[in-house]
Image (cartoon, grey):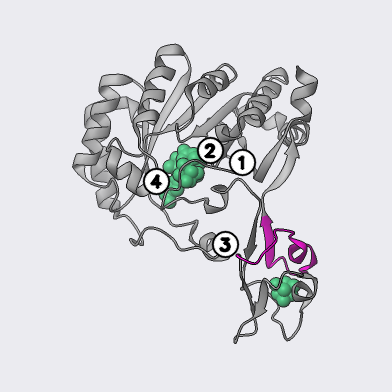
Amino acid sequence: MSLIDRKTTGTVFNVQKYSVHDGPGIRTIVFMKGCPLHCRWCSNPESQSFKPELAYNPNKCLGVDKCVRCLEVCTAGALSTTADNKISVNRELCLDQMHCADACPAQALNVYGRTMSVDEVLKRVEEDSIFYARSGGGLTLSGGEPLAQRDFALALLREARTRRIKTAIETCGFVDYETLKAAAEYLNHVLFDIKSVDAEKHKEFTGQSCERVMENLKSLRADFPDLHIRVRTPVIPGFNDTEEDMNAIVDFLEENVPNVEYEPLQYHRMGQPKYEYLGREYGIEAKQLDDAVFLKLKKIAQDRLGDCVK
Ligand SMILES: C[S@@+](CC[C@H](N)C(=O)[O-])C[C@H]1O[C@@H](n2cnc3c(N)ncnc32)[C@H](O)[C@@H]1O
Ligand code: SF4
Ligand code: SF4
């Protein structure tokens, strides 16, 4: 079993070390490609497609008066020059060969996503074992939706368990329950998003309804009463930033997963530049969420859920 696991491969777009936000202690986060949701505010737009993607950052480009290497290697005519000396990518013509990214001397062209084996990932994760032991940290699978690459995610978690590395996952909960249950056998911590309990709004802003997410959280709590679960809600302007939204989420938690840890997350736009690099538009107009609004909603949760709110 273990030998097969170690050779299993998947698509990863980042391995981030020394994180202290996504689970206890010092952690290494493995960001996996592919997501069944398309949240309009997603801070990781490069995670949503399952395939590797080409990104172009004009700020790093040397300019076509100095360098034309990418234009020379592109055989599909997907690259052209712009009036301001930069290049433009026509993604409809791109053949996904990514030769241009290999040729670019300035890393203005990059590929989000590469194939990695379980062995390769865990080798990187194990480099920091000493920090995990001291801090109570370990490996966190994130993305994208890590469980959307089912076999790879399960193999990573199983192999981490074999190597005595503590495991966590960040999940949107929109997965089939059997996969979530199989993963839970190898997990120490689950960070589980409840983005909204309003099915229509959830569908409008993420592309999918929330019923399955809510059912999965209930089943996970019932089947694994000792598993550490923290529910999180990103508070997004125009989507779930009213008292009514927060009260509806808290009603659901009180009724179905009493005493679960709960953390509202402040909206941020740190992912915005990556939308531009991918030639996509950011999906939320508001530049920020007022601190006062966020604190008011967090206080509603605290008044009702007490110390469970983190
Ligand atoms: C990028 S997601 C990946 C894991 C999983 N797909 C999910 O949604 O939970 C990790 C966390 O970032 C949060 N997040 C994503 N975009 C955000 C934004 N613009 N502002 C605040 N939190 C955000 C998500 O709600 C989630 O809790
Ligand atoms: S190869 Fe890189 S630096 Fe050169 S023109 Fe293309 S994107 Fe710009
Ligand atoms: S579920 Fe998570 S990764 Fe997927 S689009 Fe939403 S925030 Fe991004």
Place of residue 156 in the rendered image (x, y in percent of width and height, measured from the top left): 67, 28
State which tag comes first along the sequence, 1 or 4: 1
Check contact, mark 1 vs mark 2: CB within 8 A. yes
Mark 4 C-beta to ligand 3 under 8 Å: yes
Residue linked to disc 3 = 278
SS at mark 4 in the image: helix
Q: Categorize mark 1 by other alpha carbons within 10 Å: few (<14), some (14-19), many (20+).
A: many
- Extent of the magenta region: 92-111
Q: Which mark is residue 32?
A: 1
Indicate the amino acid at tag 1.
Met
Residue linked to disc 4 = 206
State which tag comes first along the sequence, 3 or 4: 4
Residue linked to disc 2 = 145
Alpha carbon distance from label 2 to label 3: 19 Å
| In the foreground, 203 or 147 | 203
Place of residue 11 in the rendered image (x, y in percent of width and height, measured from the top left): 67, 42
The residue drawn where x is 60% and y is 87% is 83
Alpha carbon distance from label 4 to label 2: 13 Å
Alpha carbon distance from label 3 to label 4: 19 Å
Ligand 2 quarter of the rendering: bottom right
State which tag comes first along the sequence, 1 or 2: 1
Quadrant hosting residue 250: top left
Indicate the amino acid at tag 2.
Glu
Check contact, mark 2 vs mark 3: CB within 8 A. no
State which tag comes first along the sequence, 1 or 3: 1
Alpha carbon distance from label 1 to label 4: 18 Å
State which tag comes first along the sequence, 4 or 2: 2
Indicate the amino acid at tag 3.
Leu
